[in-house]
Image (tube, grey):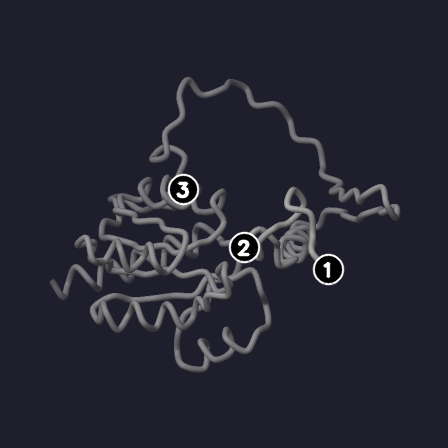
């Protein structure tokens, strides 16, 4: 049946339902209540019950990515170059200030085509981080493997909101690091610091 043009949506605009699973997992880890209510034909309401926080004593005068990125005791910037492939624009926008705050040169792209274009323009990553489920049916693990063949000196890791999938199981079986969303900045920072230091020692 043909859908009206104004209501038609491409597959790329349809979510995969992972957001709710990530929120539920995060809520469980934080020990906060969550739930939903839904009425047929009216819509759904999702909620979290959080403890009230005390207001800050004073608001900062200015915001900067470097000041806001947690360093967790690191005395110097990490350095190096990192390629991030993430198909959610809002998530992708958060990657750049985080990595730049750690002194990492970041190239953040939405898909494999943009990643190959960045490499073709001369970006040489020390680390490649690739989301597992990309749009238009693109397989993140296959993309990561292909990018690492092109960049044999780089280290790579999968990033995913899924906790169980054949592709992720295969990646772990083959020795790849798999980072689960929501990411822990301290764990990510420690991993990148180790990998970047190794890359610098080889150069």
Q: Could you say where residue 88 lies in the image, as x and y percent from the top left?
A: 49, 49
Residue at the spot 80% in from the left edge and 45% down from the top edge = 44
Q: Quadrant of residue 116?
A: bottom left
Please tell me which of labels 1 and 2 falls first in the chain. 1
Front residue of this view, candidates 183 and 146:
146
Quadrant of the frame with the N terminus: bottom right
Disc 3: which residue: 70
Q: In 3D space, how far apart are the residues under numbered discs 1 and 2 (Cα atoms)?
A: 20 Å
Q: In 3D space, how far apart are the residues under numbered discs 3 and 1 (Cα atoms)?
A: 52 Å
Disc 1: which residue: 1
Front residue of this view, candidates 129 and 120:
120
Say above or below: 63 vs 132: above
Quadrant of the frame with the C terminus: bottom left
Residue at the spot 43% in from the left edge and 46% down from the top edge = 92
Label 1 sits on a secondary structure element that is loop
Label 2 sits on a secondary structure element that is helix
Q: Nearer the viewer, mark 2 or mark 3?
A: 2
Q: In 3D space, how far apart are the residues under numbered discs 2 and 3 (Cα atoms)?
A: 33 Å
Disc 2: which residue: 12
Front residue of this view, candidates 94 and 54:
94
Q: Could you say where residue 145 lies in the image, as x and y percent from the top left?
A: 34, 73
Q: Which mark is residue 53?
A: none
């Amino acid at each position: 049946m043909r859908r009206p043009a104004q209501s038609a949506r491409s597959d790329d605009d349809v979510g995969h339902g992972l957001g709710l699973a990530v929120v539920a997992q995060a809520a469980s880890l934080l020990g906060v209540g969550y739930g939903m209510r839904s009425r047929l034909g009216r819509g759904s309401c999702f909620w979290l019950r959080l403890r009230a926080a005390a207001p800050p004593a004073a608001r900062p005068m200015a915001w900067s990515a470097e000041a806001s990125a947690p360093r967790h005791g690191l005395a110097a910037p990490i350095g190096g170059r990192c390629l991030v492939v993430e198909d959610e624009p809002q998530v992708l926008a958060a990657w750049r200030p985080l990595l730049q705050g750690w002194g990492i040169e970041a190239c953040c792209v939405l898909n494999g085509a943009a990643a190959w274009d960045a490499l073709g323009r001369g970006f040489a990553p020390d680390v490649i981080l690739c989301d597992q489920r990309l749009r238009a049916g693109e397989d993140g693990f296959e993309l990561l493997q292909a990018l690492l063949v092109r960049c044999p000196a780089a280290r790579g890791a999968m990033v995913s909101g899924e906790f169980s999938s054949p592709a992720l199981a295969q990646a772990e079986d083959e020795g790849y690091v798999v980072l689960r969303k929501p990411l822990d900045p301290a764990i990510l920072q420690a991993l990148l610091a180790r990998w970047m230091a190794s890359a610098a020692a080889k150069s």
